[in-house]
Image: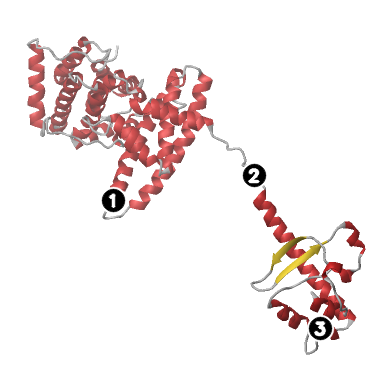
Amino acid sequence: MRRHWTEVHGRSGWEKEERAQEVKMQTFFRGTKIRYFEVTVEEEAEEESDDDKEFFVDGEEEEELSEGLTSDTSVGSLSDCEHQSSRRESKELVEIDADMVDGEDTAAMEPVTPPILSPVNFDLETLKCFHQYSSTTCRTLPSPAPAADPLFHWQTGAMSLAFTRHWIMCGLLAISEYHMAVLEDDDRIRQAHRTRAIHLFAEFKAGREIASRHVCGVTVVTTDQEQERRIGGHIMCILRCANWVSLGPTIAQDFTTYPFKLHTFITALWCFPVEVDLSALSASQQEAIDAAARILSNRRKGEPGGLSPTSLSNDHFADILDRLSELPQRMSEVFGRPDNVRDVVVTISAIAYLVEYWSASFDSKSDCGNIAWHGMLQWLRKIPDHFRHMLSRYDPAALVVFAHWAASVVHLAESCGIWFLGGLPKRVVEELDEHLRENHPAACSLIEGLLA
């Protein structure tokens, strides 16, 4: 202090008792070596001149600061102008550092207030739709294989993929919206569900097409890609059928507004990949014919054909079997001598396969809906290619057999709770009846009363 008063103020004889007083002092740090501090005096000291407000340094840093303020001369040789300028610059630096430290200390002392977050907007309709799927809809869907657990497939397998693939999630939500539309009696609410389902359906289709292009031409398909393909096919099949069913009884009767065609129905069902286990069924057409003959022979002997697992009566089961057994003879009476023997052979084979699947589905003591669903799908895959070609050109004999398929295994699956088939068996039979009346009126007697 003595040196400071001598060099800066040109005064000597400083006495501690004369000039010293107790003050509140805050020390600031700047850089790594030089340390600044400012003296705060009481109110009566505020009237003193600027010369009485000093900045002090202590220790070895005093010399460095002096060298920074002087060039080749001593501090006392500075002019008054240079001295005042250096003092103002030093004070400004201290005030800036004081503001910074005060801000830091204040922030450290005051409790931290969490930032105000904007409200999170949940899409309640989407949450409601997802809850409907996870709690109800997934329990109503068929499995990819007759012996597989449907709930595990749709609640675990499909949902695990949906959480990482947006298009699969859209597909599951679309199924849920269609399901709610089918269960709804109010036309306005049903239409609202259908509208949301259609938008989700479109998102699903677009995403599925992109995913298909990624694996197109790939020689090695990963397990995840194969699972995507299979689940995507399952969802596509269900959505196509559900789209027709959700129209409601009033709109569904208007075929011109929303046409339902036989080939679109077959194409939709063909989308559903199944693990076909044909080991328990006939491998060849002749084996199928022999097996069907045994089933029909046992039926004529009065052996029980199984108890009805649904609202369908045993009489309906027996009536379908009787119709199928008489169908070849009745068709020969209506159509006369066939022009192509191969058409006759594949038609009889298709009837024989239908007898087998109808008997196996109706006799099931487990999940009748799942068994009947796979029975109807496997029949489409089991019939000869030539018979499928007959269907594509609307051959009357093939259409008659197809109508019996719709009235048997498809109608059974519908009765067992496959909701996205609701009303479709009847629509198939009605469309076929309309076509036959226009082109082959005599053949209408072969399908008359199938779903009476």
Q: Dot 2 corresponds to which residue?
A: 113
Judge whether 43 appears above or below 267 on screen.
below
Evaluate whether residue 243 shows in this view: no
- Dot label at residue 132: none
Judge whether 362 appears above or below 288 on screen.
above
Q: How is the image coloured?
A: secondary structure
Provide residue 252's location: percent of width, then percent of height.
Answer: 43, 22
Find out whether the residues at labels 1 and 2 contact each other: C-beta distance under 8 Å.
Answer: no
Q: Residue at x 88, y 71 (%)?
A: 51
Q: Amino acid at mark 1?
A: Thr
Between label 2 and label 3, give the one nearer the viewer: 3
Q: Dot 3 corresponds to which residue?
A: 75
Q: Nearer the viewer, residue 100 or 13?
A: 13
Q: Amino acid at mark 2?
A: Thr
- Quadrant the N terminus occupies: bottom right
Side (left or right) of 373 relative to 115: left
For numbered disc 3, what is the local secondary structure? helix
How far separated are the C-alphas under marks 1 and 3?
Answer: 82 Å
Provide residue 199's location: percent of width, then percent of height.
Answer: 49, 35
First reached walking from the N terminus: tag 1 or tag 2: 2
